[in-house]
Amino acid sequence: MKKTYLFTPGPTQIPPDVVLAEASPMIHHRTSEFSEIFSSVSEDLKYIFQTKEGEVFTFASSGTGGMEACVVNALSQGAKAVVVRGGKFGERWAQICETFGVNVVPVDVENGKAVDPDVLDDTIKKEKDVKAVFVTLSETSTGVVHDIEGIAKVVKGHNLLLVVDAISGIGVHPLMMDDWGIDIAVTGSQKGCMLPPGLAFVCVAQSAWKSIEKSDLPKYYWSFKKMQKALSSKTTAYTPAITLIMAAGKALSMIREEGIENVWSRHARLAHATREGIKALGLELFAGDASSNVLTSVIAPEGINIDSAIKKLRDEAGVTITGGQDELKGKIFRIGHMGYVNEFDIVLAISAVEKCLHENGYKIELGKGVSKVQEILVG
Ligand SMILES: *Cc1c(COP(=O)(O)O)cnc(C)c1O
């Protein structure tokens, strides 16, 4: 008998009621029944992005599709954009921009560190004609959270467009669209939203429309203008992922019920317990003080092949955590704790890490991490 547990930084665990909602019989999308569901989902999405004046567009795609939509709608050919790169997803912004002929001015941050808003400020000051700044809320490849509020102050000071990849960060860390003056932010369904993969949600503030109106980069499916027109009629421009949107209705209402502030503080508490559990095992956090509440990234201990240890844990014990990607492969491992996660998930995840390290010859005192987690969560 194998039972499975998912502690990956996307996809994430799904509440049973959300699974059931996705299993609903199919309905047609040009009906008042669908329109009602869709407009309530769109309102709930505004709540999780913390916007009253902005709009949220729902695309059938993974998060990256939503990122591409941001670039092709916000910018024009030959535009210059400052991109914060400090991991795989910051790099993805740069790659998408380059694909469409946008001039990228990179701000490179060491893996495991957060960008210093003053450094960003200096870069913008040195450049002429910058149109937009692209950043990441939670850099899932390194486990770092960036200071979007501080970054927004800098970007607004220069009157530039701020575009945020909040794909793993939404519903975990605060992101205040209206209060911080973010122009465009994007998330995907399979991270903090407690949904299966397949939807990208893009939040567009009123302040972004001047650039969107002018944008001449090629787009058809991804057009914000078409999505806005459809949204005003409580629908999408093309066939929506109907049952995923039904599932979103359930998942987002669970977030509303808990209250977004409580959702943020639950994640902060669980992430803190995870970090302390890891430290109690004598391991070191890869992202140190910049650690995100989305996931915990840990420096792999010397002398064990972490990727094969993780594979064994998944194949034999049914527990999935992840290793590092690209240049971090073999150097770190990552424990996801976003979305449908409570305190016993953390106890389980840390006990699985203990088992994994122990069975692969790394000397630890079994239970030491778990007991630290318990101490924090009980106390
Ligand atoms: C997961 C993730 C992405 C990519 O999303 P896909 O759904 O795989 O396209 C982009 N950025 C961040 C920060 C992510 O966590």
Image: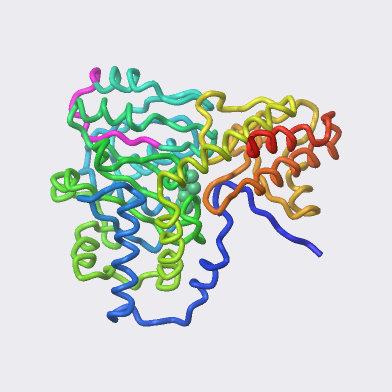
Region rendered in magenta = 125-136
Residue at the image point whose x is 52% and y is 43% from the top: 266
Can you name the residue that lies furthest to the front here? 379
Could you say where residue 346 lies in the image, as x and y percent from the top left?
65, 44
Name above or below for residue 65 compared with residue 99: below
Could you say where residue 79 lies in the image, as x and y percent from the top left?
22, 37
State which quadrant residue 38 falls in: bottom left
Is 335 a magenta residue? no
Number of numbered discs visible in the structure rendering: 0
State which quadrant residue 269 falls in: top right
Could you say where residue 268 lies in the image, as x and y percent from the top left?
51, 37
State which quadrant residue 31 falls in: bottom left
Position of 237 compared to 377: left or right? left
Q: Give the quadrant of the N terminus.
A: bottom right
Position of 294 compared to 181: left or right? right
Position of 18 compared to 303: left or right? left
Name above or below for residue 152 compared with residue 187: above
Colour approach in the figure: rainbow
Taking depth in this image into account, of 361 and 89 the one nearest to the observer is 361
Name above or below for residue 209 compared with residue 62: above
Taking depth in this image into account, of 120 and 279 the one nearest to the observer is 279
Taking depth in this image into account, of 331 and 352 the one nearest to the observer is 352
Q: Give the quadrant of the C terminus.
A: top right
Residue at the image point whose x is 78% and y is 62% from the top: 2
Could you say where residue 253 lies in the image, as x and y percent from the top left?
41, 61
